[in-house]
Each structure stands twice: as C-alpha cells, then as structure tokens.
Amino acid sequence: MSKVRVAAFSVSLDGFGAGPHQSLENPMGEGGMGLHPWAFTTRTFQKMFGNPDKGETTGINEEFARRSFENIGSWILGRNMFAPSRGPWTDDGWKGWWGDEPSYHCDVFVLTHYPREPLPVGETTFHFITDGIVSALDQAKAAAKGQDVRIGGGAATVREYLQAGLIDEMHLAISPVLLGQGEPLLQGIDLLKLGFSVTEHAASPEATHMVLSKGR
Amino acid sequence: MSKVRVAAFSVSLDGFGAGPHQSLENPMGEGGMGLHPWAFTTRTFQKMFGNPDKGETTGINEEFARRSFENIGSWILGRNMFAPSRGPWTDDGWKGWWGDEPSYHCDVFVLTHYPREPLPVGETTFHFITDGIVSALDQAKAAAKGQDVRIGGGAATVREYLQAGLIDEMHLAISPVLLGQGEPLLQGIDLLKLGFSVTEHAASPEATHMVLSKGR
C-alpha cells in the first residue's frame, strides 16, 4: 500500500530539525549542517552531490540513505525548502537549491501562500500548491501512481502533516550535536496518541536511526 | 576537580524522562519502565537488584552503568524520587523505594518544602533540604569530600539545576521508545548557551548513550 513517509530526517539531540536564523547563506540555520554528517558518509548522498565514487556503499547510514529514496513517487516540501525568498514570487530566476537536475526526478509539491505556474527543472517538476496540506497530499498521491509520497520537510511542514494524522512512517536520524535553538520537530506532539511506535533502531558513530511506524 | 553530574539518565525518543501519571504503583509514570531496558542488561544494575550473577559484564551499556556510580560522593534527589507522598511528612514509615540497604551508601540530599530530621537507612543517610537547590548542592559538595555530586533526578530537578547553570556533565541514554506525554527533560533549555557540547556518543541495541560536557 502507498505510504506517506518522512525519511532521512535529521534531528539534534535536543530535538531540532534545523538551527535558528535560516538564510540564503545558511539554509539549515546556525549549526544546522552539524545534523548531516551521517548522510555525507554515504554513497547515496555523495552521488547526489556529484561524487559518484565517494561515500560508503555498505553500513547502516548507507542503508537508511538508500531506503529513503526507494519507492518514492512524489514529494511535498514547505516553501522554505524550495526557496529562501518570502512573500509573492518574483521573477528572480530561482529554480531551487539543487541546480539543473534536482535529485527528485518526479513531481514535487511546494506548499505556498502565493500562486505560481509549475516549474519544470530537468526531470523534476515543481508544483506550487496554495490550497493547503490536504490538497497537496491528494495531488502528490495521484502523481505518485501507487508509490509512496515523501514529506521532505522542513520541520514545520512535517509537524503539520503529523498533527493532521497524515504521516504513516518516519525515519529520523538523531545526530550527536546540540543546536540549543531552532526548529523543534516533535515538541508538543503526542506520537503515541497518533498511533506511532518505534519499529526499528540502529546506530552508527554518526547517528542513531529510528523508524516510527503507525498501527503495529 | 569535583563535578556535578547527571548519569545514566534515560529519556524517550520524544524527550521525556518519565511517563505521565506517576503513582506508587507506577513510579516512573505510564510507559516509564520502557526507558530502562538498557540498564536491566547490565551487571551493575542487576547487582543492585540483588542478582549478582545476572547481566552483562562488558559492552557499552555496562560501561556507562558502571561509570555512573564511579567517584560519586553524594547525591541530590527531588522529593518524588524519594517518596510517592506529597505535602508535610507523616509518620508513615516510608524509607524510600530501595529497602533496608539503598544502593547509595553515602549522604543523599532530598529537596522538599517540608522539614524533617535526617533518616539513616543502612549505609545511606537521607537529608531533607528545605532552603533550595543551591543550599542542597553546597551541602552535597561538602559531604562528597572532593568526589562528584550526582543529581539523581527526577526530570524537574535536573531541569532546575541545568537552568541554574550548576551541572557540569550529563550522560543521557536515549531509549527507542515513545512516551507521548510525561516529564520533558530538555525542552526549552538552550544547552548550547549553557556551554554544553556532545563529547561522547555510543549506541547499543537498547539505547544511544550521549555525554554532554561543559567547557570544551
């Protein structure tokens, strides 16, 4: 059955999915890059960065990295994951953080308050959705054609879908860093009441991976 | 140098140090026992439970369990760690959760609003401190005679000492469980601003161990 998934989502020991003061220079917020060393160890992510011969091809980090892209038919992103700009879209030529061939290779639905025509970039098409998270999910499910929909983030977007009861599975990577401040991921959300339990748990030197699933 | 330490303190994936609805029957709150399987695997804790031949004598869990008791000269506990009762002390015969020979074997300072004479139980003496956390720490340091002072908990007591900037080192064990609700440990506390960083990180199948230290 098609699932709605969060995957390869890194959080700090103190529960933040990104650091404070996000900006063009610092898209993950202050200290936010410290969340992701586990991903940099992997062949899967190194390939995306254009380094096809770098990174581990085995091990727990690589396994979770690889699985995070498996059977994904479409993506949903918060606007800030797509662009550092705010407010109405301008003709600024921005095509996302990912260059001419974004690693999605499918339909990506961007949550925004401001309408905009779809934007094809390489094999990826960004669709801009202004009528809410449920509409975005309906469209993402249709586009996924039976595969899974991945909620890419950021933290605020994951929280919205979680609180609406719309996420089936989450893979979190807890990195051994403190951010102090930033975007909390789980704070104030009762995951037990939402039906989740921890169904997988494995650790590498760079992160502890936990999978939360519903209905077991 | 003598340190003020939190050690072998278990938290859930969603950040709770105990479950909701603590009671005499359920001293760790609903689901709270799920925080501690890593400790039950260890020889150190099994010995405390009266099973000197049970538990692993090697491995990460045992190493952290053993270290948690090393060089401890005195303890500080919140009242609820000592007793399920609330309000003024009555002559109810309660001597703590630990039987005739508590595993402390030293002076233990219990934070309370209600005065009470010291209570010796086996090699442990419980002192009841009514003039605040700083006074309790001063007395605990004097009693520790150069060894470390361990803040035993619960979560609210650890938070008070953290926020006052009085804790030097914390070993947390993140257990792969969700509690949904309960006593949050770190929520709203800026550990970076307090000067902490993650100085150790190791994982077993039962828990991810992290050590947070100041001033590195």
Image: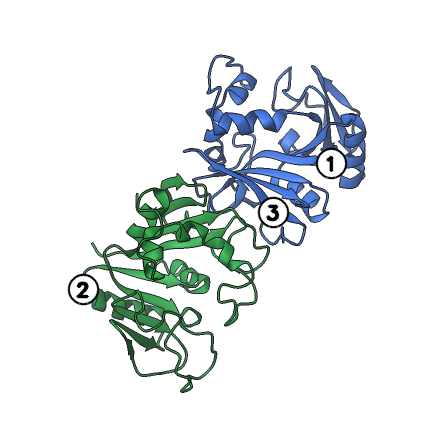
Chain colours: A green, B blue
- SS of the residue under disc 1: loop
Q: Quadrant of the N terminus of chain A?
A: bottom left
Residue kind at label 2, given as amino acid type: Lys
Which residue is found at the position 80% from the left and 32% from the top?
B139
Report the side of B29 relative to A60 (left or right). Answer: right
* Chain ID, mark 3: B
Q: Residues within 10 Å of mark 3 (few under 14, many from 20)?
A: many
Give the mark nearest the N terminus, 3 or 1: 1
Q: Is residue B187 visible?
A: yes
Q: CA distance from mark 1 to mark 2?
A: 61 Å
Q: Residues within 10 Å of mark 1 (few under 14, many from 20)?
A: many
Image vertical order of residue B125 relative to residue A8, above or below: above
Instruction: Return the x and y of residue A116 as percentages of the image width and height.
Output: 34, 83
Q: Residue tagged by mark 1? A: B112
- SS of the residue under disc 3: strand
Residue kind at label 3, given as amino acid type: Ser
Image vertical order of residue A157 relative to residue B9, above or below: below
> Which is closer to the viewer, label 3 or label 2?
3
Instruction: Return the x and y of residue A180 as percentages of the image width and height.
Output: 59, 55
Instruction: Return the x and y of residue B104 as percentages of the image width and height.
Output: 66, 22
> Which is closer to the viewer, label 3 or label 1?
3
Image vertical order of residue A182 relative to residue B116, above or below: below
* Chain ID, mark 1: B
Which residue is found at the position 39% from the left and 58% from the top?
A162
Is residue A112 or residue A118 the one in the foreground? A118
Report the side of B75 relative to B9 (left or right). Answer: right
Which residue is found at the position 34% from the left and 77% from the top?
A128
The numbered mark at residue A145 is 2
